Amino acid sequence: MSNSSSSSVSGVAAEVDGAIWRAVVGSSVQAFVRILLQPLQPLGPRPMSNDDDDNARTDVVSFSKILTPSDANNGGGFSVPRYCADLIFPQLDFAADPPVQNLTLKDTHNNAWEFRHIYRGTPRRHLLTTGWSKFVNAKRLVAGDTVVFMKKKSTNELFVGIRRASRVGGNEGQDGGEALEAIQKAARGMAFEVVYYPKAGCPDFVVKAEKVKDALRTCWRQGMRVRMGWKRMIHPG
């Protein structure tokens, strides 16, 4: 890992302002986020956290699952992990035969998608049936893509997003000109904006502040050898 001191942005620290962390509705069908970063002076005061921002971060819970070939079959249904059903979806009436409910979830374009959520089979499991094939076809989902379910706890609103698996030749996100502009602004201490498209199977671009602080405690030197772990997207359920 190289840490050249000649870099124009060497030593620039930036952190996400929770008040401007927001999901964006744009031309993409994928879930993405636009983030405004404010460089901080190395010895300057750090902004105090806002209780409202902290509450906003904890108000939304999410669960993601990489689609199996069966899930991506446009003639089939979606197998919902139990943890996802318990965390995101309203509770079924298990006294009914079968336990079933209709769900309405909004995507990044604010379009509503209706799914039939049923608990059946041997062994019994949670499934999305009616409405799932329509969603798969409309979003052109294939095995390896990821579906993300979200719930806003304060309103019980449900949302659904997708993440494309990495494809050869994929080039979605900021172009070189935008990246250069962000670097130049960061070097001058100005706020700069990045757009993040999370990809299934790729390392996280947005990481917890605690991890960044831990990394800054290490005395990095040019040519230093490091070991990096590769974390696959595996979720309980």
Image: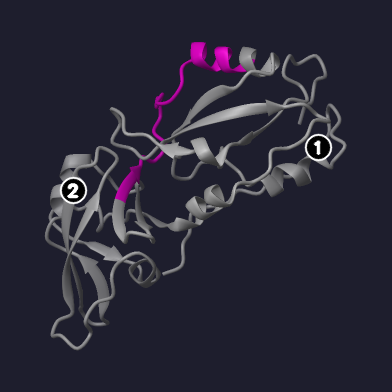
Colour pattern of the rendering = one colour
Please give the name of the residue rendered at 39% of the width and 27% of the height, measured from the top-left corner. 170
The image quarter in which residue 79 lies: bottom left
Label 2 neighbour load within 10 Å: few <14, some 14-19, many 20+: some
Q: Is residue 59 left or right of residue 108?
A: right
Please give the name of the residue rendered at 46% of the width and 16% of the height, measured from the top-left corner. 175
Question: Which residue matches tag 2?
Answer: 112
Q: Is residue 159 left or right of residue 39?
A: left
Label 1 neighbour load within 10 Å: few <14, some 14-19, many 20+: few
Question: Which residue matches tag 1?
Answer: 225
Q: How many marks?
A: 2
Q: Is residue 69 left or right of residue 95?
A: right
Residue 91 rendering spot, x and y as whole percentages: 28, 75
Residue 203 is a magenta residue: no
Going from N to C along the chain, the mark reached first, 2 or 1, is: 2
| Residue numbers of the magenta segment | 160-183
The answer to whether 228 is drawn above or below residue 154 in the figure is: above
Residue 178 rendering spot, x and y as whole percentages: 50, 15
Q: CA distance from mark 2 to mark 1?
A: 49 Å
Give the quarter of the figure containing the C terminus: bottom left
The image quarter in which residue 25 lies: top left
Secondary structure of the residue carrying tag 2 is: strand
The answer to whether 180 is drawn above or below residue 209 in the figure is: above
Residue 55 rendering spot, x and y as whole percentages: 51, 55
The image quarter in which residue 127 lies: bottom left
Please give the name of the residue rendered at 32% of the width and 53% of the height, measured from the top-left corner. 67
For badge 2, the amino acid type reads Ala
